[in-house]
Image (cartoon, rainbow, N blue to C red):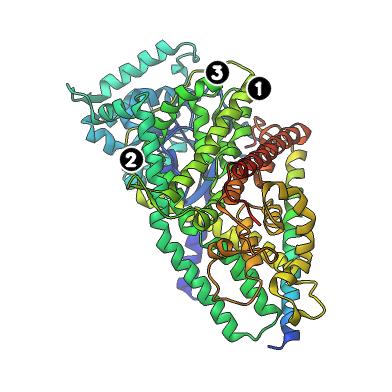
Amino acid sequence: MTSGGAERATRESERATRSLRVALVGNPNSGKSTLFNVLTGMKQRVANFPGVTVEHAEGAYVYEDARITVLDLPGSYSVSAQSPDEAVALDVILGRKPGVLPADVIVVVVDAANLERNLFFASQILELGLPTVIALNRMDKADAEDTRIDVPELIHGLGVVVIPVTATRARGIDRLRHAISSATSLPLPDPRAALGDDSDVERRYAWIDSVVERSVVRRQRDRRSVTDRVDAVLLHSVWGLCVFIVVLLVVFQSMFTIARPLADGIQWLVTQAGAFTVNVLPAGDLRSLLTGGVLGGVGSVLVFLPQIALLFFFIGLLEDSGYMARAAFVMDRYMRPLGLQGRSFIPLVSGYACAVPAIMATRTIQQREERFATIMVVPLISCSARLPVYTLLIAAFVPAVTVGGIFGLQSLTMLGMYALGTVAAFVSAAIFRRTLLRSDTRALIIELPRYSMPSFRVLAASVWQRIRIFLRLAGTVIFAISLLLWALARYPQPDAPANVTHEQQLSQSALGHIGHAIEPIVRPLGYDWKLGVSMVASFAAREVFVSTMGTIYSAGDDVHAPGLAERLRAERSAKSGALVYTPLIAVGLMTFYVFALMCTSTIAITVRETGGGLRGGAWAALQFVYMFVLAYAAAFVVYRGGLLLGLGGGA
Amino acid sequence: MTVTVQRWVAIALVAGAAAYLAFRAWRNWRNARKQKADGCGPGCGCH
């Protein structure tokens, strides 16, 4: 090693001679998660409504001689924890959380544009007498509202270091890092200045008012702010609901129109990869596996990547702009008669992305009965995993015509499926709240954040994270299942393979035998054995339905065959020559997928979040059974009802 | 690549896929048991 290299290595080792643990706390929506990302360089989901940070996140950075580990804790309004997520924050601050070392420094993130409310929690933290730094966030917003904060006066009033920052623009971060690094060597906050417990709210707010009066100068405004005027519409009992419905329509329409060319591009790539494989490899098992199993299975799921990315983009856009909290407020009055409050709306909306984080987000609900009712109905909300199933069937069987000159019938059908799941969730919640999970419904207290232009960097990071999760799922579980299904669809082979058609070979394969065994169960719904097998396989993950159909329909080597949707539309019975799949069957199948709980991850998280062990298992079993019965009954009614009305059934 | 070689490669890939899925199932089962043994659940303070 050269002397320069040795010196550098020594410097590196000397850099982190001490370590500090920092707990990032503050009110929900004070910008903690954004500050955490900026401090540590990590990417974390940021949302504009309370309760998104249910579990703590951890990241680290090196500053001068210290390695700083930062814990991003759930938002809290008070140290008197009421909900499970608030309890987590308090446990970590007080060093009571098993397996987590106590924090050396507490950074309280305070929203400069909502100083009075944020100082309530901050004042309680100061009374703990621990090394504390106040990060005065959103200084840009305070400036924009002509609110001038005298920071030295605020430091004098609070008795701790106050660093003005704007996390979204990474302003003031170096000064904050320096303050964190030196916080343990500064005088501690004086715990003698205690202002009593939560019951003495007036005394505490009187103290806060005196601090704010000395350190804040606001220009008086004699007219309503833009936020007030926009809220007058968005929070209106009727107009608010109308706007919400229009927003959803626009989202679904955009998902179809924007995603289509991207999906076509991916389909083209998959087709080209198939053609390349056929050109390079002679006919044989490996070629069939690559074209039928890998490209037919995984490729057919990858086509839906653009739509899933767009769904997460729009959900992030609505959350980060501040609209989602308004939607929760509007929905509160409609959910209250059902026994739920607006706070349950946030996990339900998260359910449009994925039921697993949505069920975890129910920890923000304080009351057990309300929380359990929300957990039980969240999987009825159509998650992104259902999107490939809906899209495939809609593309195959719903004509691409325009309704009313604006919205496409396909996007309206998609919206109908989402609406069906949402209504079913509300009705089921009302039943649970009137039977197994009875209790009074508490009033909704929700913070309405200021409207803000979402950071596209944060949005892009969030969407990219979801894309990676989807690609990992496609590259692991769906890939492995597709290979197994390919083997089951190809073997055992008939004695004289040259003399049988692909359809006959498939029917005589192991997959065909399994499918024929399942067929009596799915036949009343109008499904053939292929749909039955795909439905059973999709218990691993709903997307597997599409990959299984893709594998079944591309088990041959014909890479130039039309896409899966076209093949389904053209599939005819070998016996009668009639169409096997009809729009009626497609609608019935989509209805089944709206209601059925076909996701092992959701079952596992329900077990955990409802108490674990036998008790959690019983709740999860109830959830699975009631949803399956609902799904089967609904699909049966749709199919049989359609037949009675003279709509076409399958062969 | 001959038909026989293709068959053996395909068998290896399918066997690998089956082993991977079995491993995932075992890992999920082990994690669930571990969480239960740790007394981990909502409100336990370890989330």
Please tell me the numbered disc located at residue A441: 3
| Residue at image point 41% right, 27% down | A330
Q: Vertically, is A531 above or below A486?
A: above
Residue that label 1 marks:
A437
Residue A404: image location, x then y, percent: 34, 44
Q: Do the residues labelled 1 and 3 touch (CB within 8 Å)?
A: no
State the residue position of label 2. A165
Is A605 or A520 nearer to us in this picture? A520
- Residue A221 percent coordinates (x, y): 18, 23
The amino acid type found where label 3 is placed reads Thr
As shown in the figure, which amino acid type bears the numbered disc 1?
A: Leu
Q: Mark 3 falls on what kind of element?
A: loop
> Is A393 positioned to the left or the right of A207 in the image?
right
Question: How far apart, in angstroms, are the residues tagged by discs 2 and 1?
Answer: 45 Å
Judge the density around disc 2: few (<14), some (14-19), many (≥20) Cα neighbours within 10 Å: many
Parent chain of label 2? A
